[in-house]
Amino acid sequence: MGEEPLRTRFAYLKTGIYQAALEADAPFLDANPALAALCGLASVDELLAYAPRDFGLGHEEMAAAEPGAVQERTRWLDAADGHAQWVTQRVQRREIPGYGPFLEGAIEPMAAPTAPERGREQARLEEAQRLARVGHWVSYPPEGNRARGALWWSRVTYEIFGRDPKRFTPCIADFYEAIHPADRPYVERQRRHVEQAGTIELEHRIVRPDGEIRWVQQHKYAEYHDDGTLWCLFGTVQDITERRRAEEALRESEARFWLMAESLEEVFWLCDGEAQVFYVNGAYERLWGQSAKRLYADPFSFLEAVHPEDREPLRERITQYHQGSPELEETFRLLQPEGQVRWIRMRSRSVCDPQTQLVRRVGIAYDVTEYKELQHSLEAALNAKSKFLDSVSHDLRTPLNAVLGFTELLADSALDPQQRHYVGLCRTAGKRLLGLIDTLLDLSKLQAGRVSLQAETFELPAFLAEQLEILRHQAEQRSVELTGRIDEQTLPRWVHTDATRLAQVLFNLATNAIKFTEANPVRVEADADRAGRLRLRVHDHGPGIAAADQATIFEAFSRDAGHQDTDGSGLGLAIARELARLLGGELTVDSAPGQGATFTFMVALETAPGPPPSAAEEPPARAAEDPQKAPPRVLAVEDEPTNALMLRALLEQRGCTVLTAEDGAEALAAWRRERPGLVLLDLQLPGLSGEEVAEAIRREEAQHGEPRTPIAALTAHTTEEARARCYRAGCDTYLSKPVDREALERLLQQAPRGSESAHD
C-alpha cells in the first residue's frame, strides 16, 4: 500500500495487524507475524492465502462504511490448527490515493484472568448453576459430521444427564441418544429451527443411564460465521421434572375439580372481584331454567327469576357483599319457568391472596324446598302442640283453680287434725299437678323457641348464695343435707344475664340430685374455669347412671332403667338442658353405676362493671296502711260458677266488697254503674271477651277524662302471647289460674281502699 510491509513494520508486536480488501472472499493483503501465529500458521506468506472470514474475522458490513469508520467487537478466532481464541477485533476503513479503499485491522487476544481468579469465578458460576439447577453447554459441529461434533458440558449438565465427567466425554451423538425416543423428532425439528432463527426454547424428556426419565428445559442459541454459516450452538439446560410433575398433578386436580363441579346437583360458580362470572356449572341451567351464556354476559340476570318479594332485598344484600362484606348467605324463593316456586339457599365467600387483596369469589346455591317445607311442618306441629298444651292447660287450670282455692279456704277453717291432714294432702297433690302443667308448658315453649332471655345486672356470688339457701330448704323437706361452696376468688362479682333462667337451671339440677341421692350430702359447687366461664357442679350420692342411659338422660320423660319407680315427670333435666342452651352454655353428666352423678353446667357470662344505677338506691318508703280503711270494692268477672264462688269466698275472706258478673256485657254494665276500685277480669267470657271489656273501659275513661281503674287479667292461659294481649287491651297486671293467694294479697293492697274508688 505504498508503505513498509506490515510483516517488517510491526514484526515486534504481539498484536496481530493486517490489511484486507473490501470483498468478503478476498485474501489478506498483508499481515504481521503475530497474526499468522494467532491463526495457527507458520508464516505470513502462508496466511496470505486465506481470507479473514476463514478464521471468523469477516467484516462484510464495513464495505459500505464511510472512510475512517471504525468497528470494534469481541469474537472467536478459529485457528487453522483447530483451537479457538477469544479476541478483540478493531477494523478501520482507509483510503490511500492511487490505491483505493481497503481495511486495516488489529487482532488482540483478550487478557485471560489469572488462575486463582479464574478458579474463583468458575467456582462462583458453578455454585450459582448448582443452586439454580441450570447447566450450560457448547457444541461445535464439524463440517460433514454433525453428529460427532464436539460438545462441552458444565458440571450441572453432567448431573442432569446422570453422567460422570471423569468417565464420560460427551459428543452431539451422545446427546441425541439421551433424548427420549418419543421426543427425538421434535428436538431435531427444533434444532433445525434454531439454526435458522438463532434462538429457541423447548422442553423434552431425557433418559438417564439408569433408566430414569427426567424432563428438561433448554434455551438454545446459534452463533454464525460472517458468511452466515453455523459456527456453534450454545445454551442452557435445566431439570424441570418436579415442575412438570406439579403441573401434571395440577392438571389432574383441575380435571377432577371440573368433573366434580359439573356432577354437583348444587349450582356452583366463580366470579372475579368485579362480580363478573367466569364459571358456572350445568346445575344453574337445570335449577334456574336460564342460559349460562346470559349469566356470563350479565352477572345479575339470575335475579330475574327470583320471587318479586325477595328480589330487591336480595339485590341490596348482594350489593353490600360486593362492597366489602366477607360472606353472603341468603335464602329466597325462585320462580322456575314451569311456574314452580322453589326455596334456594345461596352462600358465597371472598378469596383473598396473602396480601388480603381480593382474588375471586366462590359461591354455591342449592334447593332447600324440602327443608323449608319440613321446617314449616315442624313449626306448625310445634305451634299445634303449644296450642294444644295451652288449651289443655286452660282446661286443667280452670277446675284446679277451684280445687286449690277451696282447699285454701278449708285450711283456714276450723278442722280437726284428721281433716286438716286430708286437706293438706289435697293441697299437695293439687300443687304437684299444677307444677307438672307448668313444666310441660315450659318445655313446649323452649322447644318452640318462644322463650326469650330477660337480662339484668346482678351480683353473682350473692345471687348464688341466696339460691343455695332456697335449695337447702327444699333438701330439708326430704331429710337430705345440701352443702355448697362458692369460690368468690374466681367468680366475677357483677354479671349481666337472665337471673331467673340461671336459677332455674340450678334448681332443676339440685332438685334432681335431692330426689335421687341415697346418702348425704348433695354438694353444689360454683366457680369459674380458666376461660372465665361460670361452672356449676351438682354432685349426688345416688346409684349412678349407666353409660347407655347417659345418652338419653336429657331427653323429655327419660329415666334410666334403674329408676323407673322414682317419682317425677322426667322433664327437669330436659328443661335444664334447653335453658342451658338458651343461655349459651352446655350441660354434661359424669357418672357410673354405684358412684353417684355429677352434673356440670358451663356458661360464659357477660361481666358488668358494677351494679346498675338504681341498685344502690333504696326503694321509696311505702305509705303505711291505714287499718281503719275498709278493703277495696272488687268486680270479679268469672263465667265458671265454681270458680266464681271460690273467687268471691277468697275476696270476702279478706274483707272485700265483691261485685260479680258472668259475661262481658254484664261486666261492662257493672263497671259503669259501680265504678269499683279493682276489676278481676277473666279473659275467656261469653259474648264480649275479657280483652274487649278492658278495651271498652279504657276507651270510655279516655273519652270522659276519668282516672284509670286497675284491671287484673284473670285466666288459665299462661303463654307470653296471652300476656301480651292482656297488656295491649289495657290490663295493668296478670294473674294466672290457679290464683296465688300471695299475689292476690299484693294486688289488693295496691287497690283503692274502702269506699274510695278510682273515680271518687
Image: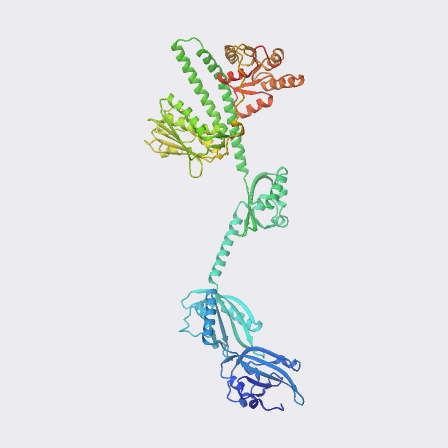
Residue 286 screen position, x and y as percent = 57, 45
Q: For the point 57% across and 24% down, which residue is it?
A: 724
Q: How is the image coloured?
A: rainbow
Q: Is residue 93 left or right of residue 179?
A: right
Task: Specify whether residue 567 is in view.
Answer: no
Up-down relation of residue 527 to residue 407 (above or below): below
Is 210 or 732 nearer to us in this picture? 732
Up-down relation of residue 698 to residue 536 (above or below): above
Is 185 or 527 nearer to us in this picture? 527
Quadrant that contains the C terminus: top right
Up-down relation of residue 258 to residue 736 (above or below): below
Residue 82 screen position, x and y as percent = 49, 82
Residue 496 screen position, x and y as percent = 50, 32
Residue 621 screen position, x and y as percent = 53, 20
Number of numbered labels in the structure image: 0
Q: Is residue 324 left or right of residue 410?
A: right
Is 294 or 16 nearer to us in this picture? 16
Quadrant that contains the N terminus: bottom right
Up-down relation of residue 632 to residue 178 (above or below): above
Q: Is residue 757 left or right of residue 646?
A: right
Task: Specify whether residue 287 is in view.
Answer: yes
